[in-house]
Image: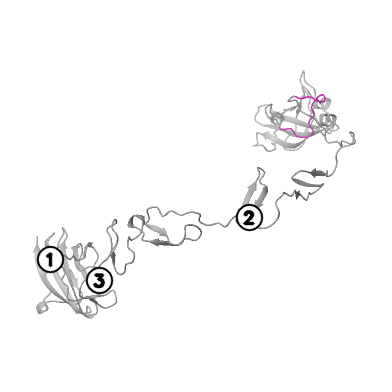
Amino acid sequence: MPLDRKDRVKDQTQTTGTGSVVIDGLAPLGYRTITSAHATGSDVRYTIINAAGTEWEVGQGVWTSATNTLTRATVFASSNSGNLVSFSSGTKAVFTGPTAVDLNELATLASPTFTGIPAAPTAAVDTNTTQIATTAYVVGQGYLKSAAAASTYLTGNQSITLSGDASGSGATSIAVTLANTTVSAGSYTNANITVDSKGRVTAASNGAAGGVTSFSAGTTGLTPSTGSTGAITLAGTLGVANGGTGATSLSGVLIGNGTSAFTTKTNPSGAFVGTTDAQTLSAKQLQGYSETTTTTTVSTTTFNLDTSASNIFDITLSANVTFTFTNPPASGVARSVTVILRQDATGNRTATFTNARYSDGITPVLSTVGNRIDVLTFFTVNGGTFWFGTFAMANVS
């Protein structure tokens, strides 16, 4: 049943526990009893509270007049965290009437959301205001009715007919036919085409053969050797300023300065022997050449000296290190290496060279004072099997 809301309904009960509540039928002065206010079977909102106000419950239940019983169906809020309250003995007041739940269910004045079947006043025919248009108003205006019979409402799929550039008709689907233009279907070569504002091709014809219609060499230095239209063959020399060499034909090594024409670099006399990257320089004089130096601080106990990457190693010792020469040349080819050893501020660092051989078999004694420098030179002729060493400088400060 719909909710039964009445004013000034207050009764009492002696019921304990969480079950149905038996109403005493005693209302204070100015109030009505629940029996006199509600018909049997009514859904009512109720509030039950003990005299001390410590036990209370708000919910919805069903009223049965024959037994003066209120059956507690749904609890909205209670002193038992929203659950049924197990009431203790004593007289409890029982109210029926609107609760906070009812107020929260009311639609807001601004942008309300309705449920059920809300009703509204029906505006007069042809009303043109912001008043709500009810279904009665829509019927009165004659909307959704067939033109042939004003009293017949439109039902089912209605037929729609298209005309103009696109034609066709149908009730559930329409096969659209585009209107033909004056242009003949087919392929066009070098076409001249006219398109109207609707995107339709309204005229088309074959055009003249395409290609270059004119040519200007500008400042490139190139000139057409076979005509100036159609396929053009160019002749001449492309200048340096235009990305060319400025030369007609060149071979060998080219050299240029960015402005003048490139020239061929004359090879020096003599020859490099061999055809690989490892060349032998024969009968040449070296002047002002440099050697690659590797400079590093070594704090590990072992370190590789890559002789293919550098000929001079400038090393600061920060630990006692054993050095190994790596990547030597093949046996029969000599390679020399210079090693500069620097003691760090601590000093007393030692250095040992694997496969090193010294005069009289005596290993050089390095400086021990901090920041002192020793220089050793090594060379090999047998692929690194031995590295012959010389103590070139000692205890340099």
Q: Is residue 241 on the magenta stretch?
A: no
Which of discs 2 and 3 lies nearer the camera? The answer is: 2
Which residue: 74% across, 50% down?
180
- Image quadrant of residue 144? top right
Give the tally of numbered discs.
3
Q: Amino acid at mark 1?
A: Asp
Q: Which residue position holds label 1?
A: 374
Quadrant occupied by the N terminus? top right
Q: Residues within 10 Å of mark 3 (few under 14, many from 20)?
A: few
Q: Nearer the viewer, residue 230 or 107?
A: 230
Which region shows up in magenta?
113-128
Label located before the other in sequence (2 or 3): 2
Mark 3 to mark 1 CA distance (whole Å): 23 Å
Whether residue 124 is in magenta: the answer is: yes
Image vertical order of residue 64 relative to residue 329, above or below: above
- Give the labeled residue for mark 3: 308
Asked if one can make out residue 239 in the rendered structure from this viewpoint, the answer is yes
Residue at the spot of label 2: 206
